[in-house]
Image (tube, grey):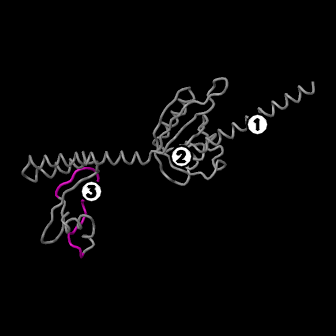
Amino acid sequence: HFSAFVRDLTERNQAKEKLIASEIRLRTIFNTEPECVTLISSKGVIEDINTAGLEMIEAESFSQILNFCIYPLVTEHHRQAFLSLNNKVFAGESGILEFQMTGLKGGMRWLESHASPLRDANGNVVSMLSITRDITLRKFSEERVARLTKLYKALSEINQAIVRMDHESQLFPLVCRCAVEYGNVNMAWIGLLDNQTGLVSPVESYGHGLCYLDEIVISSKADTPYGLGPVGTAMREKK
């Protein structure tokens, strides 16, 4: 009986050592994963997060975010979508979401999360497992391409208008409208230079905030403060 007891104790110790080694191995993999890996509760509380995730939310250590709810970090514009994703996962489904987040130190990032249910031995969903990557550079590139596409569209429309129209009374309103509608700007205006006074006077405008032009004073001369802005500089340099 004693030998059987010793053998059973040895087997238990070996099993315990294997379990500890397995946990260490999994924790090492977890923390060296370059993407953010997070476990989030049904209430949005961070239950576990790897090193990449701590850097992403600008936390110094896990103790800093112990029992911390992630929802306030998600920008207000995307918060409801994040809540919906969490609810979807705890209903047993998976999902993907692109959203903006503000870190604990104020850094703004665009993120893409792939979220799935994490279940216990009985099949119950106990956490949202989220793998998140930083897509800020990609989003900035997409926005830049979109802005340039709209700008080229505006220039194309303006060039066509120049070919079709031979009088400024028709051309100027169309140019301003194309700049706003296709160029993704809030307001556009055209000014003409008075060669005697050196002043630039608005003659046509389109868009929002046109009251800005009511009291504007712009000069093409460099010896006055009214000529040191972008319009005055452009007029002098002819570009």
Residue position for label 3: 211
Secondary structure at numbered mark 2:
helix
Comparing 23 with 1, the one in front is: 1
Q: Is residue 207 magenta?
A: yes
Marker disc for residue 163: none
List x then y, in percent, for residue 201.
18, 63
Q: Which residues are magenta?
A: 203-223
Residue 178 falls left or right of residue 34: left
Q: Amino acid at mark 3?
A: Cys
In space, the residues marked 1 and 2 are separated at their CA atoms by 39 Å
List x then y, in percent, for residue 66.
66, 45
Residue position for label 1: 17
| Image quadrant in which you'd find residue 89 | top right
**Residue found 54% across the figure and 44% down from its top:** 34
Circles 3 and 2: CB distance less than 8 Å? Answer: no
**Residue found 33% across the figure and 49% down from its top:** 144
Residue position for label 2: 73
Circles 3 and 1: CB distance less than 8 Å? Answer: no
Which tag is nearer the camera, tag 3 or tag 1?
1
List x then y, in percent, for residue 238.
18, 65
In space, the residues marked 3 and 2 are separated at their CA atoms by 37 Å
Secondary structure at numbered mark 3:
helix
In space, the residues marked 3 and 1 are separated at their CA atoms by 76 Å
User: In the displayed structure, would residue 29 be above or below residue 203?
Assistant: above
Q: Amino acid at mark 1?
A: Glu
**Quarter holding the C terminus?**
bottom left
**Residue found 24% across the figure and 45% down from its top:** 182
Circles 1 and 2: CB distance less than 8 Å? Answer: no
Secondary structure at numbered mark 1:
helix
Residue 124 falls left or right of residue 235: right
